[in-house]
Image: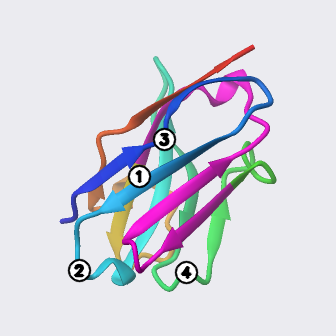
Amino acid sequence: QVTLVESGGGLVQAGGSLRLSCAASTLSFTTYGMGWFRQAPGKEREFVAAMSWRGVHTYYADSVKGRFTISRDNAKKAMYLQMNSLKPEDTAVYYCAAQKYGSGTTTTDSYDSWGQGTQVTVSS
């Protein structure tokens, strides 16, 4: 398993932007497919974005497509989520997840390791 630590959450007004980071504690970061998920109060954890372990394929939930961008920096062993044009419905705890040789899976049960989450709150 990999230890993952998210950062970058906070309070932002609707229409604003945030950049989330996920730091991984593994020497083999390049062999992990990575994903972002979120969970709002009273709701199930849902897929946001994912990237295959080679970094070739990216996937997005329809609700964030065109507004969010997932990226990774293998040299820094980090993954990012650039969130633009934020909406109040984006308010949630955001989690990063890792899957060995993952293809960019969109389901929670495919991932081996999870971070503790970072809170994103979008005010209207």
- Residue 98 in percent (x, y) is at 35, 64
List the residue tagged with mark 3.
8
**Mark 3 or mark 2, which is nearer the start of the sequence?**
3
List the residue tagged with mark 1.
96
User: Quick one: label 3, few (<14), some, or many (20+) residues within 10 Å?
Assistant: some
Please state which amino acid type lies under the numbered disc 2. Leu
Depth check, mark 2 against mark 1: the one in front is 2
List the residue tagged with mark 2.
27
- Residue 31 in percent (x, y) is at 35, 83
Say which of 111 and 76 sits in front: 76
Specify the quadrant that holds the C terminus. Answer: top right
Q: Is residue 32 left or right of residue 105?
A: left
Span highlighted in magenta in the image: 69-95
**Mark 1 or mark 4, which is nearer the start of the sequence?**
4
> Where 106 sits versus 13, above or below?
below
List the residue tagged with mark 4.
55
User: Quick one: label 4, few (<14), some, or many (20+) residues within 10 Å?
Assistant: many
User: Which image quarter: residue 97?
Assistant: bottom left
Depth check, mark 4 against mark 3: the one in front is 3
- Where disc 2 sits, the SS reads loop
